[in-house]
Amino acid sequence: MENYVYGLLRDYVYTLSASWECWDGVCVCSNRREKGISFLEFYETEMERAPHLAKSTRKNHWLTFCLLRRFAPDLDFADLTYTFLCAFEKFLIAQSYSQNTIAKHMRHLKRYVNQAYYAGWLSDRHLFDNYKIKEESRPRNFLTPDELKRIEELDGSQLKRGLLGTRDMFLFSCYTGLRYSDVTRLTMENFQLIEGQWWLFCQMKKTGESIRLPLHLLFGGKAVPLFLKYRQDGVLFSAMLNSNARVNKQLKRIAELAHINKRITFHVARHITFSYSLKTRDLQRLSA
């Protein structure tokens, strides 16, 4: 409450009172647009010309943009205040979004607010200092050793080709800890035979971190037969290059066939907790 009151006072003193009124879910601001582009135009331009954004990330940023445009069609830089952040959050709550989804949209907004500041369109770099992005902590979903074994032992003849490939790609991620965005980019160039043992070298797409994985030391070398099964010119798992959402639907069916009563997504592969699995930092030490 104190932060909210402080924000109201600050907005009144420093922004010459942005007057917000909502009609049918659309926010109307009394401030006139200053000369130049609006914040929404800046947001859209920055989003479209960011080459490093993955397709899925760009889509999420676009959803935030659409919500902002729906809430405040004439949103200008001068309208970005603590009061606006609270009003936009209230709007998202009214749309029945979960707290973590709201937090995701607010993080996207913060990203472009920061970019606007560094580009010289905003004078206040502390807009989000008094606004806390609230998230709910949720327990991570993971597979137990028994559940992983059930997926491994699924009869391949009972799986359609698409499900079999998705199962194998998911298991490869379980054994290596690679994200979906990394597994789907692997080619033969990422694998090297060193002293008779296969190693995996790649740069993580999300973090830019370069890693070296001794496949023979991970989960008893179970990733090696999968690599040998699918190795080819081009992308390793090219036959399974569906969208992440499509793969997750296939994993749901795979979980049903393995009699696993929990929601499995591809990201769950990174949460395998075998006692003999090695953490990335341990692998880096071994491979140094």
Image (cartoon, rainbow, N blue to C red):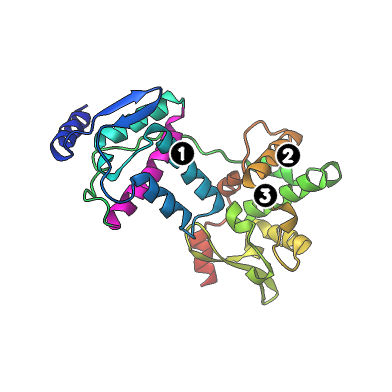
Residue 276 visible? The answer is no
Identify the residue shown where x is 38% and y is 36%. 73
**Crowding near pointer 1: few (<14 within 10 Å), some, many (20+)?**
some
Identify the residue shown where x is 67% and y is 69%. 198
**Real-space Cα separation, disc 1 to disc 3, in angstroms:** 33 Å
Q: Amino acid at mark 3?
A: Phe
Q: Secondary structure at mark 2?
A: helix
Q: Earlier in the sequence, mark 2 or mark 3?
A: 3
Q: Secondary structure at mark 3?
A: helix
Q: Is residue 71 above or below residue 220?
A: above
CB atoms at circles 1 and 3 under 8 Å apart? no
Give the magenta-colored segment's residue range: 97-119
Q: Which residue is mark 3?
A: 170
Q: Which residue is mark 1?
A: 66
Please tell me whether mark 2 or mark 1 is closer to you in this view: 1
In the rendered image, the residue lying farthest to the right is 157
The majority secondary structure of the magenta stretch comes to: helix
Q: Is residue 3 above or below residue 278?
A: above
Position in image of residue 98 (x %, y %): 46, 29
**Is 160 displayed left or right of 215 in the figure?**
right
Q: Earlier in the sequence, mark 2 or mark 1?
A: 1
Identify the residue shown where x is 48% and y is 63%. 208
> Disc number at residue 254?
2
Quarter of the rendering containing residue 226: bottom right
Q: Amino acid at mark 1?
A: Cys
Residue 46 visible? The answer is yes
